[in-house]
Image (tube, helix red, strand yellow):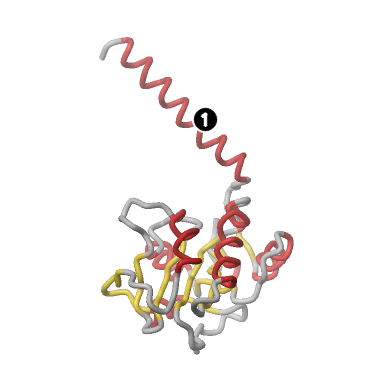
Amino acid sequence: MKYATIVLISILFVIFQSCTTIAKKVYGIKNPKIETVESVEKYLSSINVSAENNIFCKDILSYKTVLDLFGKSLPEAILFNSDGKMLNYKKNNQDCNAGLFETIPGLSKSSNLQILEGNDIQKFTTYLVDRNSLKFSNLPKADYFLFINWAKYMGKLNKDHVKEWEELANKNLNTKIIVYKINLDIMESWNVKP
């Protein structure tokens, strides 16, 4: 390999490495820690986000499955219709979660979003528990169910995305959207060793 190519690759590596570091600092992203329900709810309170409808993965295997369903992205959201079918809110597969800032206020009972076959709310909720580690069930009547994932270690993104998405859903008077926030921190109750 030529010397110039090696230098160019090294410079690009340093630039991209630095961008990650800068993004982590700007958004306050930290290394994940093992959390408890109480520490998670205390954090939500500190950023003025309601702990109501905050739910958890029931164990580490459920965590992996849920994270996969979210496309291994945080924060991210999954939208279901009243029939429990998962909907695609993105204009194409490469869109990031920013589309939610338009989709949520634009939802109405007559919105026509593509159904993602093979994914339904009944199966999805089998991986989830409430704050008391009880099975998550008995969904109320709604036009849409918006599941937003989040984690303490994601820092400012919890305010910039999670809080705003929930507020947008609550302000949408054209349809009834129920929001659930799925905490994706590693929970002490899972007895996972670091």
Residue appearing at x 46%, y 54% in the figure: 98
Q: Is residue 166 left or right of residue 63?
A: right
In the rendering, at what x and y percent does residue 124 appear?
40, 76
Image location of residue 139, percent across then percent down:
49, 86
User: Tag 1: Cα neighbours inside 10 Å, few (<14), some, or many (≥20)?
Assistant: few
Left or right: 115 in relation to 71: left
Q: Quadrant of the N terminus?
A: top left
Say which element carries label 1: helix
Q: Nearer the viewer, residue 85 or 69?
A: 85
Image quadrant in which you'd find residue 93: bottom left
The residue type indicated by label 1 comes to: Ser
Residue at 48% x, 84% y is: 142
User: Which residue is rendered at x = 51% and y = 64% of the image?
Assistant: 149
Corner quadrant of residue 70: bottom left
Vertical placement of 174 versus 46: above or below? below
Q: Going by the image, does 11 lie left or right of 189?
A: left
The C terminus appears in which quarter of the rendering? bottom right
Farthest top residue?
A: 3
Query: Is the residue 139 above or below the residue 69 in the image?
Result: below
Q: Circle 1 sits on which residue? A: 18
Horizontal side of 23 relative to 72 (left or right) equals: right
Residue at 51% over, 84% down: 135
Q: Position of residue 177 (x, y in %)?
A: 51, 76
Q: Depth check: 25 or 80 in front?
A: 80
The residue closer to the viewer here, 188 or 164, is 164
